[in-house]
Image (cartoon, helix red, strand yellow):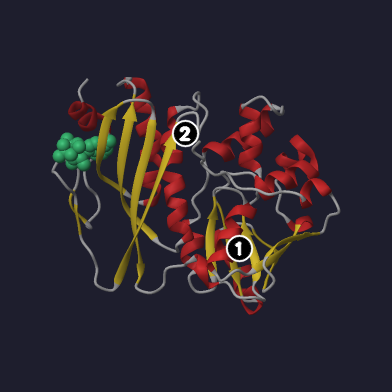
Amino acid sequence: MDEFRLIERFFRRDSKSSEVVVGIGDDGAVVKADTNEQTILVTDTMVAGVHFPERTAPQDLGYKLLAVNLSDLAAMGATPNWFLLNLVIPDADENWLEEFSTGLFSLAEEFGVELIGGDTARGPLCLSATVGGHVKSGTALMRNGAQAGDQLWVSGTLGDAAIGLDLVGGVLGANDHDMDYLVGRLNRPIPRIVLGLSLSAVATACVDISDGLLADLGHILRESGALGAIVDVSCLPLSPQAIAVCGVSLARQKALAGGDDYEICFTASPAQRPQIEQLRDQCNVKLTCIGSVRALSGIALTGTDNQDLTGIKSGYRHNWP
Ligand code: ADP
Ligand code: MG
């Protein structure tokens, strides 16, 4: 199958969105822009063997590729609109493409984002998406607004995806029920779009947790002017499944340093606490205060005397020799 038939068959769909003037099929896509809005662009790449185990189901890959991009938009407080898809695939395996596109479009439809173009090439498996969204001008949530005295919040539970990865790799073991949940958290992160939209009015800074809490919180603190934070380890939200599989201590390590959770970390004035507690119900997501921001730089961990935890330095980084 050549690249054009592949695109027609698996990726070209009827346009539903009034914002898309020209979608797949021309040299470029044409989208409308509203003068009261700003466009937010995010992009993410997933390389086989680096970002996902080679055996990951294609449906999960399609879902996750879009989910991790939507998570970036959530962290910006943006509404997603459309996306571009760059596929490098070793062969045109029809089953693979069918499943990949099913996973991809299931999430695209859930959030009303339309595929408007991309590129397709033959080579070692590498998946990339670029998503465009919008905010009302001036309302984007950024990393640089944290203030000393702000409280530190996270959504959902942390560490599940890293434990899921260990389960897939056979480093940890679990019963089927816990396995399904934790591997599901690895492969099917929930983009916190609705939460991100609501946070525009209450958060001072925001980031999505892709490389681990300590690493991504570090980005907020650095961008906000070399601030620091105190994180109460005993407050970290852990799922019952995470605790069942690896115990509280290791689960806390995974929560602090494990990647791929795609939960939201944000800072807000203590005065916003009642509003944030209301958001829990409105957005149907667990929100936990885990500490506070302070002027003294660095992240201090309290609530534990476990040296395994206090010694953690985290964050996945790609390195080249
Ligand atoms: P060009 O050669 O002009 O760069 P292509 O032949 O690569 O264009 O692509 C033809 C059309 O198909 C374009 O509209 C492009 O955006 C779209 N397209 C290519 N690959 C994909 C893909 N993986 N998903 C969605 N659209 C794609
Ligand atoms: Mg091209």
Where does residue 126 sit, x and y in percent of width and height?
38, 32
The residue at the point 53 percent across, 59 percent down is: 207
Mark 1 Cα shell of 10 Å, populated few (<14), some (14-19), many (≥20): some
Q: Nearer the viewer, residue 120 or 16?
A: 120
Residue drawn at 62 percent across, 59 percent down: 154
Name the quadrant containing residue 66: top left
Circle 2 sits on which residue? 60
Is the CB of the residue bearing disc 1 within 8 angstroms of ligand 1? no
Q: Depth check: give the residue in front, 316 or 67.
A: 316
| Residue at the image point whose x is 69% and y is 27% from the top | 171
Q: Amino acid type of disc 2?
A: Asp
The image quadrant of residue 160 is top right
Q: Is residue 12 visible?
A: no
Residue 265 location in percent, x, y? Answer: 59, 59
Query: With respect to residue 102, does 18 lie above or below?
Result: below
Q: Say what amino acid the circle numbered 1 marks.
A: Arg
Q: Quadrant of the N terminus?
A: top left
Residue 315 in the image, given as x and y percentages of width and height: 60, 47
Q: CA distance from mark 1 to mark 2?
A: 27 Å
Residue 299 x/y as whole percent: 69, 61
Seen at 60% across and 53% down, the residue is: 215
Q: Secondary structure at mark 1?
A: helix
Mark 2 residue crowding within 10 angstroms, few (<14) / some (14–19) / many (20+): many
Marks 1 and 2, the one that precedes in the sequence: 2
Tag 1 residue:
280
The answer to whether mark 1 and mark 2 are in CB contact below 8 A is no
Residue 214 is left or right of residue 203, and the answer is: right
